[in-house]
Image (spheres, grey):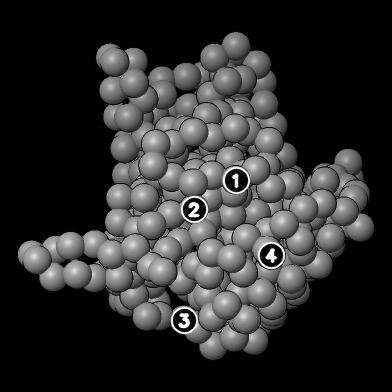
Amino acid sequence: MKNLILVNHIKFDLLKILVLGCSGLIGRAILEKSSKFFDVIGTYNKSTIEISGIKLISIKLPQHIDQLCSLIRSEKPDIVIDTIANSNPEFCELNKEQTYKLHVESFNKICSVCSKTNSKLIFISSDYVFDGKKGNYSENDETSPLNYYGVTKVLAEKNVLKHSKNVIIRTSLVYGWNPKAKFLNFVLDNLREEKTISVYDNIFSPTLLDELTEVIIKIISSNVSGIFHAVGSSCVSKFYFAKLIAKKFKMNEKLIKSLSIHDSNLKIQIPKNTCLDNTKIKNTFGITFSTIEEGLAKVYFQSQLTKSN
């Protein structure tokens, strides 16, 4: 039986949301934000999470996929949000069997059980589904991944689209004032210690975590389906983004060196330009995504608030 919410003496069904991967950057943010509006359950892998009033279950994939499917069958959530992935493309390239089991085999079972429980599936995908030859990709562009991480994302996407009510959200390098924001913290942690870092020159659309979470909440609350590109409004190189982080946080940007994606030591192919066009999602939900200058200003402000507290 669904929980009910009382608004102005009228009872409304309270959507039941299952968030997969709550120990990760995006999953945790969705969990915390969505719990204000919905009946939320979350799963996590290694990092123990305790949030008052939210049911949280430890499930490790792909090992415990049957346990997860049983959970979906018993809870019958209205919406399942899957944020689970190994987001290290190099690891995926060197560990294809393990990656396939997590990104494709396990996910296919999730898709199947969601179809049987009539649960809408929202899948977090990546700009790496494209080969990076042209940039400014729209939702209608054909996928053509260069590396195995991208290949598995495309295979998962195809399964999502078999069911007309489902949603794919493609995003790109998510940043925010958060210990799990890997790239931002990689830059800041090294520069604090005055270490030189090398950053690739590939071009992409950095995305502010708060804005990605906001649009996911809007998608949960709406009746949309299909593919959406939820990314920031800047199209820049990772090298330039790192320099801007250093500048905003008043660190030595000269310690940042540019590294070509054609470097012979690379174990994978990195697409040159995977910038995504966010016009569709802006028009659908009326959201304006920050430029990197605007986004980093918000992150810096949050960092100062943390210090003062």
Q: Which residue is mark 1?
A: 57
- The reply, left or right, for residue 29 in relation to residue 297 is right
The local secondary structure at tag 4 comes to: helix
The C terminus lies in quadrant: top left
The local secondary structure at tag 1 comes to: strand
The disc label shown at residue 69, or none: 4
Q: CA–CA distance between discs 4 and 2?
A: 14 Å
Q: CA–CA distance between discs 1 and 2?
A: 8 Å
Q: Amino acid at mark 3?
A: Ser
Residue at x-position 36% and y-position 25%: 303
Between discs 3 and 2, the one toward the N terminus: 2
Q: Are the two marked residues, 3 and 2, in contact with CB atoms closer than 8 angstroms?
A: no
Q: Which residue is mark 3?
A: 225
Q: Are the two marked residues, 4 and 2, in contact with CB atoms closer than 8 angstroms?
A: no
Along the line of sight, the residue nearer the viewer: 74 or 93: 74
Q: Are the two marked residues, 1 and 2, in contact with CB atoms closer than 8 angstroms?
A: yes
Q: Residues within 10 Å of mark 2 (few under 14, many from 20)?
A: many
Q: Which residue is mark 2?
A: 41
- The reply, left or right, for residue 127 in relation to residue 1 is right
Along the line of sight, the residue nearer the viewer: 284 or 37: 37
User: Residue 42: x, y in percent?
Assistant: 53, 50
Q: Are the two marked residues, 4 and 1, in contact with CB atoms closer than 8 angstroms?
A: no
